[in-house]
Amino acid sequence: MGNTYCVAISTGKGFFTAEDRNDFYLSGHAGDVWAVGNNNAGIGWINRIEGTSKVKSDAQAIVDAKIEEQQVAYDAQSEEFKAERVRPTKYTLP
């Protein structure tokens, strides 16, 4: 079925429910990007949370930019910090 994408800032508890998770695919990503199952329930959720719809390429660019920002911050840390953590890595949205 595929996914649709949006940008939305999580408001915490109730932002999505167990019922939402059962009704459609949902995954959160860097830059407040959400991959949402492309069905009526998923589109309804985007509307309910007042998300801003994005095409996949725009959503991917937001995620990539945020990860690059995190990589710069990681690279500026001490060797001790780096020994305990993994450098953020770019990936392709589902």
Image: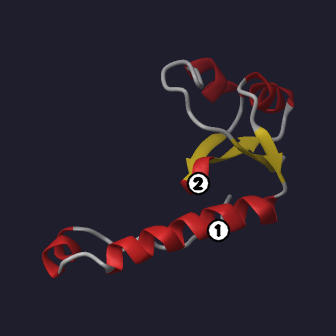
Q: Which mark is residue 66?
A: none
| Residue ID at (66%, 39%) | 8
Note whether 80 is above or below 40 in the view shown: below
Badge 2 amino acid? Gly
Q: Residue at x 76, y 22 (%)?
A: 48
- Amino acid beneath label 1: Thr
User: Alpha-carbon distance for marks 2 and 1?
Assistant: 14 Å
Seen at 31% across and 71% down, the residue is 86
Instruction: Give the side of residue 91 with respect to residue 88, left or right.
Output: right
Pick the residue in front: 44 or 54: 54
Residue at left 31%, top 79%? 76
Left or right of residue 81: residue 8: right
Between residues 46 and 17, which one lies in front from this camera angle?
A: 46
Asked which secondary structure carries label 2, the reply is helix
Contact between marks 2 and 1 (CB within 8 A): the answer is no
Q: Secondary structure at mark 1?
A: loop
Total marks in image: 2
Q: Give the vertical position of 53 relative to 84 (above or below).
A: above
Mark 1 is surrounded, within 10 Å at the Cα level, by few (under 14), some (14 to 19) or many (20 or more) other residues, namely: few
- The location of residue 34, given as percent across then percent down, is 66, 45
The residue tagged 2 is: 31
The percent coordinates of residue 5 (x first, y second) are 76, 48
Q: Which residue is mark 1?
A: 92
- Sequence-first tag of 2 and 1: 2
Q: Residues within 10 Å of mark 2 (few under 14, many from 20)?
A: some
User: Residue 90, position in %: x, y?
Assistant: 54, 73
Q: Is residue 33 left or right of residue 45?
A: left
Look at the picture and state if 56 lies above or below 68.
above
Residue 52: quarter of image: top right
Instruction: Select label 2 or label 1 by which is in front.
Output: 2
